Amino acid sequence: MFDNTTFGKSLDVLQRTMDVSLLRREVISNNIANAETPNFKRTDVTFEESLSKALASEGKNTFKMTMTDERHIPADRTVDYKTIKPRRVLDYTTQSDSNGNNVDIEVEMMDVVKNQMRYQLLTQAVSEQFQKINMVVK
């Protein structure tokens, strides 16, 4: 019903971000559960930066470049935000304990809190979207 509208797009982006928040909760829980497992590497979820770039690419009125060969990569390519998927990324960059595990339980607990607060903010944003619709309908 709200496809191709700003309202529909806003709800879709909020829903996708909430889904990623749930995935992130699973990943953080897995990291915490394996905090003492030897050679376990923590996992992180990336999504927001890719989504932001995709949304920014939609509004660009860039200079159109002429491609002389079909193998050229277009510089002004628009990325559909619906194609952006969350990615689980293994963290090999942080330091490991003596057992090869790189889970820092304090960092993971902070990530739990940040993720929970982000999810609550998203639910409030969805609620506000529907409150606006209710105001218009009344």
Image (spheres, rainbow, N blue to C red):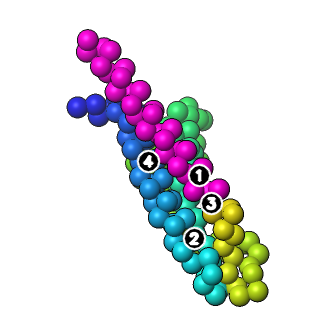
Would you name the residue on which mark 3 appears?
109
Q: Are marks 3 and 1 in contact (CB under 8 Å)?
A: yes
Q: Are marks 4 and 1 in contact (CB under 8 Å)?
A: no
Residue 32, numbered circle:
2
Would you name the residue on which mark 1 appears?
113
The x, y position of residue 6, in whole percent, is 39, 28
Dot 1, how many residues are within 10 Å of its Cα: few (below 14), some (14-19), or many (20+)? Answer: few
How far is the residue under mark 4 from the one under mark 3? 19 Å
Mark 3 belongs to which amino acid?
Met
Q: Is residue 53 left or right of residue 92?
A: left
Q: Residue at left 66%, top 73%?
A: 103
Give yes or no for residue 131 being in the magenta stretch: yes
Dot 3, how many residues are within 10 Å of its Cα: few (below 14), some (14-19), or many (20+)? Answer: some
Q: Is residue 98 left or right of residue 91?
A: right
- SS at mark 2? helix
How far is the residue under mark 2 from the one under mark 1? 13 Å
Would you name the residue on which mark 4 appears?
18
Dot 4, how many residues are within 10 Å of its Cα: few (below 14), some (14-19), or many (20+)? Answer: many
How far is the residue under mark 2 from the one under mark 3? 8 Å
Q: Is residue 97 left or right of residue 120?
A: right
Q: Residue at left 32%, top 15%?
A: 135
User: Which tag, 4 or 1, sits closer to the chain's start?
Assistant: 4
Which residues, given as a range, are shown in magenta?
A: 109-138
User: Which tag, 4 or 3, sits closer to the chain's start?
Assistant: 4
Question: Residue 28 is drawn in which quadrant?
Answer: bottom right
Mark 1 belongs to which amino acid?
Val
How far is the residue under mark 3 from the one under mark 1? 6 Å
Mark 4 belongs to which amino acid?
Met
- SS at mark 3? helix
Mark 2 belongs to which amino acid?
Ile
